[in-house]
Amino acid sequence: MKNLYINTRFFFALIGVGILYVFGFFFSPFVIVGHCILLVLFLATMVDYLLLFLQKEAILAQRILPEKLSNGDENPVKIDIRNNFGFPIHCKIIDEIPFQFQKRDFLIERKIEAGKNTLFQYVLEPKERGEYHFGALNVFTSSPLGLVSKRFSFQKDAHLAAYPSFIHLRKYELMALQNEFLLGGMKKIRKLGHTMEFEQIKEYVPGDDIRTINWKATSKSNRLMVNQYQDEKAQKVFILIDKGRTMKMPFNGLSLLDYSINATMALSHIILKKGDRAGMMAFSKKSENKLAADNKSGQLRKISESLYNIKTDFSESDFNRLYQEVKYSINQRSLVLLFTNFETLDGLNRQLKYLRGIAKNHLLVVVFFKNAELQSLIHKNPENMQEIYDEVIAEKFEFEKKLIIQELKKYGIYSVYTLPENLNVDVINKYLEIKARGIL
């Protein structure tokens, strides 16, 4: 009886009987009618109960989870329900999803025909990495009478880990292999030159660079021949992630740190597909989660595992220690992408000597963020004096960001200044641009 639940239809019928009894106080025939309806209600309820409780394994349900959750992305969760009753049923499905999603009103209602399966799905979008615990999958089933319901419970315990974003890796890969990206339209990265890694001699076709004509091969074959080059491979690319307090700033439910981690995952995938070696390191007061640059088959999995446990410690990041770590652990000229956030020029100047030290031996790209709220203030038409003040202050902060870019450029340090939502595309685009220009 613990799985028996009384439906609202039963209570409405009971209220109707009560009203008849009230009228019966004045007109006695209503009492007889009330007795009859109450008897019918009792018998119908017993029939409904027997229909639902006599048959074993009348309902089979299964929650189909992905192998792991992709942080910041929409992850589909499927539910498969089979009705083994000999009649159609009405189901209310309440899945006890992890508390992190704060969905207290989760309810799906479905009608399932006799002997049929129904497959449907809902979407979960995690906003933090870590363990997610699912409770029971509860299916409340009613017969066509609809007076009572029986609860069926399935899969009472399930654990799932949320890893850095991986769902869109395939999409980025397809675009990157063509050296093009969706950035307000298709952006083609123009090849400005070639590296010195020779691939083959081939016959000239319209569009080939005439500067690569091989005159010696042309004279021998009596056909126009050109040298074909390929991007230099096995170059080292290190990604440094600042996990200090400035990276805790939220945007659309994710922190800047999580955006950086997701971008690191996407960029590492492209780096490895391009044949280069990807490595990473996280830092604040000290350097942690170090992973040497490599391009072996299991490198992306290692990067994902390293990124999984990165948390901000709310400390002021020590760029001096970072400089020392880079100096002694990265002994070959490499592309170094630093994910951090400078809000003011003074904040940059305090760390500039360490960035310049890194840039002496490596190609350094500093990735920092636009403030989305300030951007909305700048592009908003002010309607009163307060909004004018807000716009002026926002423009002042935006101008200071541009000064940061110019200051970095003065010392040969590249930069990516972007909105968090565009981070993946912009950093991969910068990597492809550097590869295309052959400046590493």
Image (spheres, rainbow, N blue to C red):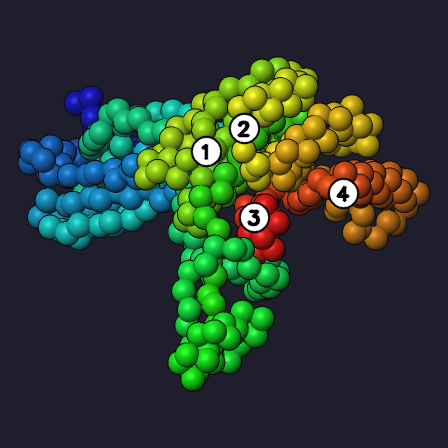
Q: Which residue is mark 2?
A: 330
- For discs 2 and 1, the disc positioned in front in the rendered view: 2
The relative height of residue 351 versus residue 127 in the rendered view (above or below) is above
The earlier-in-sequence mark between 1 and 3 is: 1
- For discs 2 and 3, the disc positioned in front in the rendered view: 2
The earlier-in-sequence mark between 2 and 3 is: 2
**Any part of residue 178 in sight:** yes
* Callout 4 secondary element: helix
- Quadrant location, the C terminus: top right
Q: CA distance from mark 2 to mark 3?
A: 19 Å
Residue at 55%, 59% (x, y): give it.
194
The earlier-in-sequence mark between 4 and 3 is: 4
Residue at 27%, 32% (x, y): give it.
137
Q: Nearer the viewer, residue 247 or 202?
A: 202
The earlier-in-sequence mark between 2 and 1 is: 1
Q: CA distance from mark 2 to mark 1?
A: 9 Å
**Any part of residue 22 in sight:** no
Residue most extreme to the bottom: 222
Which label number is shown at residue 431? 3
What residue type is disc 4 on? Lys
What residue type is disc 3 on? Tyr
Q: Which residue is mark 4?
A: 409
Q: Nearer the viewer, residue 208 or 421?
A: 208
Give residue 145's position: percent from left, percent from top.
20, 44
The relative height of residue 67 versus residue 87 in the rendered view (above or below) is above
Q: Which residue is mark 1?
A: 293
Give residue 332's position: percent from left, percent from top.
54, 33
Tags 1 and 4 touching, CB below 8 Å: no
